[in-house]
Image (tube, helix red, strand yellow):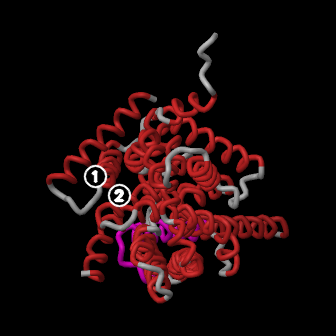
């Protein structure tokens, strides 16, 4: 578990350095995250210790922003005056976020040709085609075998009747 | 035992110590989490929301400081150790993103388009409604960042100088709303595939939605974590420019 934590702190540190000196508009931890994804993609696996730490953080992510959120007591008067605006804005925005994301994905999964030019899609289609071709071939083969058996049977009958 | 400490002095001593703020944060969260699990993971009993309310009541009512500002400063002095881990948790999101990538074959393009469309819809609607209803600059400003998972959102908030506090609060409320509403919204539109449901929940309901998604279906959970992280990264890159463009 400790080496997973060390690994994450290390990438966080690298991210902070890059953010300070190269990309000041992006928060350091986000750069650390991007670099870690790149590192994992090259490595091709997540070691169990890192996976354990990451799962623990993901599960209780909410705990970590409690201290900042308690600051809401400083904004109470402001929030009270604008309670209606805040609630409408938040509710509408949540509904739109979920439905737009889901509907766009649904659209794509019905009309696949929209992203048919991507390499991954072509590969997938090729594999599907290959599967279908093999299946058709197999069925033809079966039919041929059946036909031959029928013929043989007829022949045998014919010989018998002779 | 002639010089016994009066109980109030013990309280003063304890409330000045960072340990007290830490215990308060973790204990209230533990109470919230226990209630959440006991209630069969009902999203209304969000552990973070329960913890925030309990702490707010305790520090503003029980002599933590003369004003709310004093009380909060004193509390944060200790709780900043928990706060610090936000950055670390952000980096840790790399793992679910990476795991999601492995399952995304052939879906990368639609997922990117959907994420971008979803977060534009979410940010634009929140900002426009808040602005139209004259909600005040600090509230409108935090509507830009609230559609992203809290740890990243607060990083962005600091960059574009809107209130990280309001951002965090709005994000928590968004998470609660999203986790409650998501199943109904997705059923209305007859969306069946788990990966689509997961991705939409990750964009709309953040961390709380993900825990729910994982409890229903493994694939939904993986896609939800991936969508939440990726949405955060894209927003962190693009939002500062959009904000400057719109607000000069």
Residue A85 belongs to magenta span: no
Which of the two discs, 1 and 2, sits closer to the camera?
2
Q: Is residue B132 visible?
A: yes
Q: Which residue is mark 2?
A: B155
Residue B77 lies left or right of residue A19; in this view the side is right
Q: B2 or B182: which is nearer to us?
A: B2
Q: Residue at x 31, y 44 (%)?
A: A12
The residues colored magenta run A112-138
Q: Are marks 1 and 2 in contact (CB under 8 Å)?
A: yes
Task: List x then y, in percent, for residue A3.
Answer: 38, 29
Q: Residue furthest top?
A: B1
Which numbered marker is on residue A125?
Answer: none
| Quadrant in the picture for residue B235 | bottom left
Q: Is residue A123 left or right of residue B237?
A: right
Question: Are callouts 1 and 2 both on one chain?
Answer: no
Residue B110 visible here: no
- Tag 1 subunit: A
Q: Is residue A32 above or below residue B107?
A: above
Give whichever of A133, B42 is nearer the camera. B42
Quarter occupied by residue A86: bottom right
Measured as percent of width and height from the top left, residue B54 is found at 63, 50
Q: Position of residue B117 (x, y in %)?
A: 44, 79
Q: Which residue appears farthest toward the left when viewing the image?
A: A21
- Which residue is tagged 1? A28
State whether the magenta stretch is mostly helix, strand or loop.
helix
Residue A4, compared with residue B38, is above or below; it is above
Q: CA distance from mark 1 to mark 2?
A: 8 Å
Which residue ends up furthest to the front in the rendered image? Answer: B2
């Amino acid at each position: 578990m400790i080496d997973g934590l060390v690994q994450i702190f290390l990438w966080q540190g690298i991210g902070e350095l890059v953010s300070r000196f190269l990309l000041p508009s992006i928060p350091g931890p986000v750069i650390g995250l991007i670099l870690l994804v790149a590192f994992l993609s090259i490595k091709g696996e997540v070691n169990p210790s890192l996976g354990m730490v990451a799962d623990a953080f993901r599960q209780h992510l909410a705990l970590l922003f409690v201290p900042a959120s308690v600051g809401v007591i400083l904004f109470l008067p402001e929030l009270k005056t604008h309670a209606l605006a805040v609630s409408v804005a938040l509710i509408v925005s949540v509904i739109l976020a979920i439905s737009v994301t889901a509907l766009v994905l649904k659209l794509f999964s019905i009309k696949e040709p929209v992203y048919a030019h991507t390499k991954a899609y072509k590969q997938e289609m090729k594999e599907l085609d290959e599967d279908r071709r093999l299946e058709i071939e197999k069925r033809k083969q079966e039919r041929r075998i059946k036909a031959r058996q029928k013929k043989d049977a007829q022949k045998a009958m014919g010989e018998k009747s002779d | 035992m002639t010089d016994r400490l009066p109980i109030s002095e013990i309280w003063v001593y304890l409330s000045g110590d960072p340990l007290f703020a830490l215990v308060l944060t973790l204990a209230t969260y533990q109470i919230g989490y226990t209630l959440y699990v006991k209630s069969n993971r009902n999203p209304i009993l969000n552990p973070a929301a329960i913890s925030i309310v309990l702490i707010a009541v305790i520090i503003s009512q029980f002599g933590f400081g003369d004003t709310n500002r004093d009380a909060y400063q004193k509390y944060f002095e200790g709780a900043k150790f928990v706060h610090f881990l936000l950055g670390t948790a952000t980096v840790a999101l790399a793992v679910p993103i990476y795991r999601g990538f492995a399952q995304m074959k052939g879906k990368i393009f639609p997922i990117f388009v959907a994420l971008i469309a979803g977060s534009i819809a979410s940010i634009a609607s929140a900002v426009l409604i808040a602005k139209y209803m004259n909600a005040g600059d600090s509230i409108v400003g935090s509507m830009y960042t609230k559609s992203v998972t809290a740890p990243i959102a607060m990083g962005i908030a600091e960059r574009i100088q809107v209130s990280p506090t309001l951002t965090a609060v709005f994000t928590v409320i968004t998470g609660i709303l999203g986790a409650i509403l998501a199943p109904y919204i997705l059923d209305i539109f007859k969306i069946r595939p788990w990966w689509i449901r997961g991705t939409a929940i990750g964009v709309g309901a953040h961390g709380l939605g993900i825990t729910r998604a994982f409890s229903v279906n493994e694939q939904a959970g993986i896609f939800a974590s991936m969508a939440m992280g990726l949405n955060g990264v894209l927003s962190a890159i693009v939002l500062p420019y959009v904000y400057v463009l719109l607000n000069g």
